[in-house]
Image (cartoon, rainbow, N blue to C red):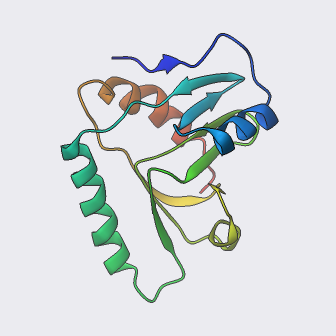
Amino acid sequence: MEQEKFTTKRYTVAEYMALEMRSDFRHEFFEGEVFAMAGASIRHNTLVLNCAVALRNGLRGKPCRVFVESVQLAVEQGRYYNYPDVAVTCAPADLLAERTIESPVLLIEVLSKSTANRDRSWKFNQYKQLPS
């Protein structure tokens, strides 16, 4: 199942960020379009949690943080924002950020039948643009 577009309206980044602050649901942003994120299964949630716990334990004492699902990633400022399943960052600016990180050293997407094609192709190509 493809992601459902939130609306046909084109949003500015500021409008998108305001939407995210007041919404009970997460949305991805790509070049002015906003897409609602699908809910996750229990299996998906378990895999994400297991990855995050293992990474957090392995990084204990290091200046890095592990984030899951609700921390936003700016893949390209002003162009593409999403929520990876698991992200690790050691960048000082990211460690101080309240909501959005920009320089992850590791991203994990747990694949499902409905998201695998998008995650392996389009989203992976977007992630490859990150300088980190």
Q: Quadrant of the C terminus?
A: bottom right
Q: Is residue 106 above or below residue 29?
A: below
Q: Position of residue 31 (x, y in %)?
A: 70, 24
Q: Quadrant of the N terminus?
A: top left
Q: Nearer the viewer, residue 7 or 105?
A: 7
| Rendering quarter of residue 32 | top right
Q: Nearer the viewer, residue 23 or 132?
A: 23
Q: Is residue 39 left or right of residue 23?
A: left
Q: Position of residue 20 (x, y in %)?
A: 65, 40
Q: Is residue 58 left or right of residue 35?
A: left
Q: Residue at x 44, y 50 (%)?
A: 69
| Rendering quarter of residue 27 | top right
Q: Residue at x 62, y 24 (%)?
A: 34
The outermost residue toward the bottom is 61
Q: Is residue 38 above or below residue 129?
A: above
Q: Residue at x 36, y 35 (%)?
A: 39
Q: Position of residue 91 (x, y in %)?
A: 63, 70
Q: How many marks?
A: 0
Q: Is residue 45 left or right of residue 13?
A: left
Q: Position of residue 30 (x, y in %)?
A: 64, 27
The outermost residue toward the top is 8
| Rendering quarter of residue 52 | bottom left
